[in-house]
């Protein structure tokens, strides 16, 4: 893809989005009331600020997710050359999964997957 | 397969320990101590079995007889740390996490092994990271102590920053040479300004890891805050491994700009020795004291690196070997005192000889070895380092190093004086140390005595060092 | 796609990112922000490697490999750092570096 077509792509994309927004703001009937302008929270009036701090427990999941998520970076190259790598590559990826599995088992056993 | 036997064995026992940990019931965690130590002893012994050496993965990984020797040295050190840490692991605070200690320590050892036998910068970087990240968790091991968490966070941030700087240098080396393999980088290195900048970044990153002086500030805090066994591991084994690979890379990859890094190391060696000694003098906490003394020792090691020859390599390895035994001996005594009484201040050591003569004598031997008093191993280690530097005609550097040795003698003797001569109203009471501690200290003493009096060890290393330079 | 972009631009971007990261590391007080600065440093290195590989040495993929491994290691590093930070948060109820002054010279 050359730079020109990329620019064209952006222009067309922006144009289409603009058209869609334009149509949706003119065609449907509109009605406003103060309740609608509020931040949506299950229909009842909102409480406090929306800039909450996350619960620290959230980070525990974030850590586990982060580690296992990034490991896919190594699985994708293998998937790309799976046929060429053959049996040897397969055995290697099985070892890889085995070690990852032990890690998961450990996290499970330690109760890191439980929301407190 | 056989070429990588050190790493594969270590990986195998790590996985075994992890599986044991997973399936061990909650209240029987202490049962893992004996199998862990036995397995490690087995691996250490197996490391000495001669086997094939060579290159794997298209040059990413390579071993030689010399590298195998380095790995064996590290194995012995880790085994001693394992044995010494039992008395700490049996305390109530740690009883939930005993196996984690072993597993994390083993994974850092695997990282170090890969780092030492790396043949390109990618393997080197992976090994380096594997060797540092688990140590940060170990430093933060005592979850209920604020200091421990502080040490952990300082260590992980400092090591991440230093590896970032190091990587930036490596990216420039890659950009200018087009390869990350050591031999090819060495062949195409032309010392253009960009490459020299890259080298400086690389050097700064490594200096962080070895805690050489302008980059040493994290070391004392981390050493003080971390649990004492982790401190001993950090100051002896991980420093030793970093020194090994630093020497190898300087000698092989950056051989072309040897004249330049010699000047850099010259200045840094003087700074490191002097600052380490001066700061060590005013410390009252034993861990902090040993931390600064280990910074000073790193300065002495640089003298061997500057020797820049077969002799230089030999003296570095020989010194690290002795240093492992003597520093672990000193830490072993400090560990058992800290675990039995919770005292870590040097003032508490007053009159220690009256209550615990055997431990005092061990401490004395280890400190004499660290200071380099003649008939003991440490003297030979330092002497050979000085000889390597003197052979290059760097007499002023050697003179400064000798002066620093004398200064260091002063503060090592202060502890010995406290133990033997000072009287105290409340000396540390008599306690009986457990079998593991005794075993660990006995290995250290044996190491100090045998290596000091047996010249074959030195001859053996000298013979192996032919290949590297 | 990016044939027109010269190597220098990538290098300038990476250098700016690197030093912004260093600056953030030194100046910021919140531990999570410091961690983000570290990520900036590592990602600047990634840009360097990929740019060098793509524009100077396209015949081998060493730079790409390096980048992939740096990403993975950075994730491991971040997870360990966050774990320790959570621990500090539980002890101190905040994660400001100013409060970590137990040990000084």
Image (cartoon, rainbow, N blue to C red):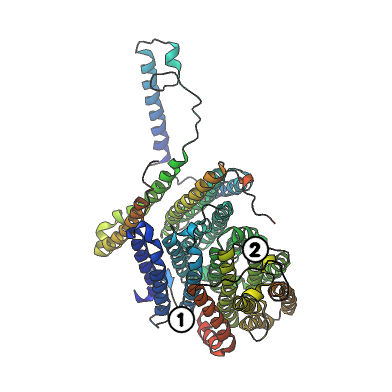
Q: Quadrant of residue A79?
A: bottom left
Q: Nearer the viewer, residue B158 or B253?
A: B158
Callout 2: SS: helix
Q: Is residue B179 visible?
A: no
Alpha carbon distance from label 2 to label 1: 36 Å
Residue B205 numbered mark, or none? none
Quadrant in which the N terminus of chain B appears:
bottom left
Q: What percent of the width, then of the height, locates residue C104?
A: 67, 54
Q: What percent of the width, then of the height, locates residue A116?
A: 40, 41
- Up-down relation of residue C26 to residue B106 (above or below): above
Q: How crowded is mark 1: few (under 14 residues within 10 Å), some or many (20 or more)?
A: some
Task: Give the residue pinned by disc 2.
Answer: B288
- Up-down relation of residue B288 to residue B83 (above or below): above
Q: Is residue B261 left or right of residue A112?
A: right
Task: Give the residue pinned by disc 1.
Answer: B65
- What residue is shown at x 54% (from left), y 89% (from top)? B456
Q: Do labels 2 and 1 share a chain?
A: yes
Callout 1: SS: helix
Q: What percent of the width, then of the height, locates residue C100?
A: 62, 48
Q: Which of B196 and A43 is in front in this view?
A: A43
């Amino acid at each position: 893809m050359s730079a020109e077509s990329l620019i064209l792509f952006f222009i067309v994309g922006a144009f289409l989005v603009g058209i869609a927004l334009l149509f949706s703001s003119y065609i449907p009937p509109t009605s406003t009331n103060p309740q609608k302008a509020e931040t949506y929270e299950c229909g009842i009036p909102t409480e406090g600020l929306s800039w909450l701090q996350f619960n620290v427990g959230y980070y525990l999941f974030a850590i586990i997710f982060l580690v296992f998520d990034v490991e896919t970076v190594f699985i994708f190259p293998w998937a790309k050359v799976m046929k060429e790598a053959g049996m040897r590559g397969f055995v290697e990826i099985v070892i890889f999964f085995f070690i990852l599995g032990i890690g998961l088992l450990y996290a499970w056993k330690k109760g890191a997957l439980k929301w407190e | 397969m056989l070429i990588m036997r050190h790493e594969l064995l270590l990986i195998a026992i790590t996985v075994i320990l992890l599986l044991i940990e997973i399936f061990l019931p909650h209240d029987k965690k202490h049962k893992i101590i004996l199998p862990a130590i036995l397995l490690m002893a087995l691996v250490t012994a197996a490391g000495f079995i001669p086997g094939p050496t060579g290159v794997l993965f298209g040059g990413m990984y390579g071993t030689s007889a010399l590298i195998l020797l380095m790995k064996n040295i590290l194995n012995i050190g880790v085994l001693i740390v394992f044995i010494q840490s039992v008395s700490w692991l049996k305390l109530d605070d740690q009883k939930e996490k005993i196996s984690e200690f072993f597993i994390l320590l083993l994974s850092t050892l695997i990282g170090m092994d890969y780092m030492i036998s790396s043949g390109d910068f990618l393997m080197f970087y992976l090994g380096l990271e594997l060797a540092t990240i688990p140590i940060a968790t170990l430093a933060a091991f005592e979850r209920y102590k604020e200091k421990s968490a502080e040490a952990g966070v300082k260590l992980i941030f400092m090591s991440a920053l230093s590896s970032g700087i190091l990587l930036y240098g490596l990216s420039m080396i890659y950009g200018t040479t087009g390869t990350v393999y050591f031999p090819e980088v060495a062949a195409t290195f032309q010392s253009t300004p960009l490459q020299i900048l890259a080298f400086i970044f690389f050097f700064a990153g490594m200096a962080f890891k070895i805690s050489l002086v302008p980059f040493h500030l994290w070391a004392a805090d981390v050493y003080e805050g971390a649990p004492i066994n982790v401190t001993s591991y950090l100051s002896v084994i991980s420093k030793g491994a970093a020194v090994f690979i630093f020497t190898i890379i300087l000698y092989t990859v950056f051989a072309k700009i040897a004249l330049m890094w010699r000047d850099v190391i010259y200045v840094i060696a003087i700074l490191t020795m002097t600052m380490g000694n001066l700061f060590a003098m005013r410390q009252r906490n034993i861990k902090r004291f040993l931390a600064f003394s280990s910074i000073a020792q790193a300065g002495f090691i640089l003298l061997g690196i500057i020797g820049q020859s077969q002799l230089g390599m030999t003296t570095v390895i020989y010194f690290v070997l002795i240093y492992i035994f003597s520093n672990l001996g000193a830490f072993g005594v400090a560990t058992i005192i800290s675990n039995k009484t919770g005292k870590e201040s040097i003032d508490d050591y007053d009159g220690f000889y009256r209550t615990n003569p055997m431990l005092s004598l061990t401490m004395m031997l280890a400190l004499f070895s660290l200071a380099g008093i003649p008939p003991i191993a440490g003297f030979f280690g330092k002497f050979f380092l000085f000889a390597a530097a003197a052979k290059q005609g760097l007499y002023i550097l050697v003179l400064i190093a000798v002066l620093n040795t004398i200064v260091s003698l002063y503060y090592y003797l202060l502890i010995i004086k406290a133990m033997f001569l000072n009287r105290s109203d409340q000396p540390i009471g008599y306690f009986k140390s457990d079998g593991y501690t005794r075993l660990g200290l006995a290995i250290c003493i044996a190491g100090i005595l045998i290596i000091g009096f047996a010249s074959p060890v030195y001859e053996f290393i000298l013979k192996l060092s032919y290949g590297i330079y | 796609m990016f044939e027109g972009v010269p190597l220098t631009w990538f290098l300038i971007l990476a250098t700016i990112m690197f030093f912004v990261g260093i600056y953030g590391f030194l100046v910021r007080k919140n531990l999570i922000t410091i961690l983000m600065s570290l990520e900036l440093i590592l990602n600047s290195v990634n840009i360097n490697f990929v740019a060098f590989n793509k524009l100077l040495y396209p015949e081998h993929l060493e730079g790409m490999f390096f980048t992939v491994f740096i990403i993975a290691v950075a994730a491991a590093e971040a997870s360990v750092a966050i774990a320790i930070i959570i621990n500090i948060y539980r002890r101190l109820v905040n994660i400001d570096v100013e409060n970590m002054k137990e040990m000084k010279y």
